[in-house]
Amino acid sequence: MMQMINSYIENQVRNADPLELVLMLYNKAISCLKISKKTIEEGLTEPEQVKKKAENLSRATEILAYLQGSLNFEKGQEIAKNLNEIYETLINELVKANMENDTEIIAKSIEILEDLKKAWEDVRCKIVNSKKS
């Protein structure tokens, strides 16, 4: 069963356009942050809970670093510069959240990522609509 799921996800990634890949990365980062937040809220009394929190925060941070590294400053200019600053700030905040088990920082990070994801979804809609015209 897991093999089928992994094949399905792999196929989605291979066939996605760059904008879809960005949205997939945002979804995964948000999901990881929600898991981390919930794990902290439930209490970090067992080593497995601490590991789960840290691994998910680390995954979200890695995704942000990947997004940051994929920015094209030549084409993106001001937008790329702004996204770079946002990603850098989020990465630093998530490191802090991991050390301090701060769910407020995680919640704010989720909110920012959801806003960014919505902006990218709006871009996708405009592209789709312009192709129809």
Image (tube, rainbow, N blue to C red):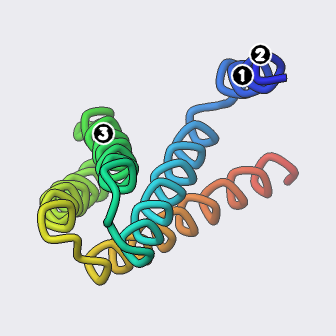
Tell me: residue 11, above or below residue 24.
above
Graded by Cα atoms within 10 Å as few (under 14), some (14 to 19) or many (20 or more), the crowding at tag 2 reads: few
- Using residue 46 as the reference point, say whether residue 20 is left or right of it: right
What amino acid type should be assigned to the residue bearing mark 2?
A: Gln
- Of residues 131 and 80, the one drawn nearer to the viewer in this rendering: 80
The answer to whether the residue labelled 3 contacts the one labelled 2, judged by CB atoms less than 8 Å apart, is no
What amino acid type should be assigned to the residue bearing mark 1?
A: Asn
Tell me: residue 133, above or below residue 112.
above
Whole-percent x and y of residue 107? Answer: 38, 78
What amino acid type should be assigned to the residue bearing mark 3?
A: Glu
Residue drawn at x 77%, y 16% is 3
- Using residue 70 as the reference point, say whether residue 3 is left or right of it: right
Whole-percent x and y of residue 32? Answer: 47, 54
Residue at the spot of label 2: 3
**Mark 2: secondary structure:** helix
Graded by Cα atoms within 10 Å as few (under 14), some (14 to 19) or many (20 or more), the crowding at tag 3 reads: some
- Of residues 118 and 32, the one drawn nearer to the viewer in this rendering: 32
Residue at the spot of label 3: 62
Disc number lying in front (3 or 2): 2
**Mark 1: secondary structure:** helix
The answer to whether the residue labelled 1 contacts the one labelled 2, judged by CB atoms less than 8 Å apart, is yes
- How far apart, in angstroms, are the residues tagged by discs 3 and 2? 24 Å
- How far apart, in angstroms, are the residues tagged by discs 3 and 1? 20 Å
Whole-percent x and y of residue 102? Answer: 23, 76
Residue at the spot of label 1: 6
Residue drawn at x 17%, y 66% is 93
- Of residues 73 and 88, the one drawn nearer to the viewer in this rendering: 88
Which residue of the protein is positioned furthest toward the front in this rendering? 46
Residue 76 appears in the picture as rendered: no
Residue 35 appears in the picture as rendered: yes
Q: Which of marks 3 and 2 is nearer the N terminus?
A: 2
